[in-house]
Image (spheres, rainbow, N blue to C red):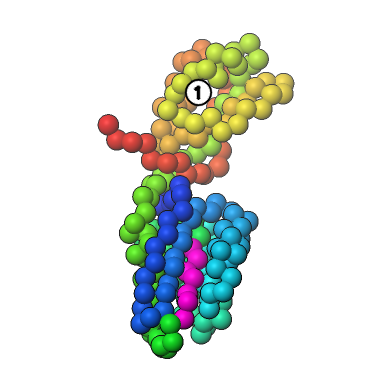
Amino acid sequence: MPSPYLTLNETVEHETEVRRSRFICAVAPARTVEEAAAFIARRRALHPSATHNCTAYVIGQRLQKGDDDGEPGGTAGTPMVQALVGRGYNDVAAVVTRYFGGVLLGAGGLVRAYGSAVTETLDRAEPVRMVPARLVRVAVAHDQAGRVENDLRASRHAVRDVAYGAEVVFSVAVGEDDVAAFADWVATLTAGRARVEPGEDIHVPEPPRH
């Protein structure tokens, strides 16, 4: 079963200094490799004269990549990835921009500096907790679709897509623990005429606790 994870809704930036070198870290939401690449390109364009723009991203809880950008191998990208994973983050990208201050840090010092740049930035973030859910498809006849759509959109479950064909199919994000109750609710709502099919695993923001 998929696990909960943390992500971001907006970019967070923080600067640290280690032995006269400036480390400027920015962490942003990135749900695809393309979004991560675009964010990295923007940061590099913002700091074209930096000594290094080292990068890391974690996407889909499985895809992890770090880039040392000229620092000694394994001293920047890897500790950045480890910092993101260690804090439980996913679907995020990080760029640490370094302006060299004239003092060599050594491999251990670089690992600590790049890892700490990310963790200290995450300390300033407002994480969004994402919890396991299913994309449930609800198929109804056209004569029921209007009322069903109104009730679905008024519920706490997000309607992700509506497809019109021989019948109308709503794709609804439903929390993993709520799938059975949701199916029962739809059955009552439609007098048993709807077809409910749980689909792929997804994640949704954790609902606020009241």
Q: Position of residue 195 (x, y in %)?
A: 58, 24
| Number of numbered discs overlaid on the protein picture | 1
**What residue span does the magenta drawing correspond to?**
94-100
Which one is nearer the viewer's eye here, 130 or 112?
A: 112
- What residue is disc 1 on? 153
Residue 89: where, in percent of width, then height? 42, 57
Q: Quadrant of the C terminus?
A: top left
Q: To which quarter of the image does residue 144 belong?
A: top right
Which secondary structure class fits the magenta region best?
strand
Question: Residue reaching furthest right?
Answer: 166
Q: Position of residue 145 (x, y in %)?
A: 60, 16
The residue lying at 53 percent from left, 74 percent from top is 50
Looking at the rendered structure, the kind of residue marked 1 is Arg
Name the foreground residue: 15 vs 153.
Answer: 15
Q: Quadrant of residue 67?
A: bottom right
Left or right for 165, reference 147:
right
* Element assignment for label 1: helix
Across and down, in percent, residue 113 comes to: 38, 76
**What residue sits 36% from the left and 50% below the top?**
126
Specify whether residue 1 is in view: no
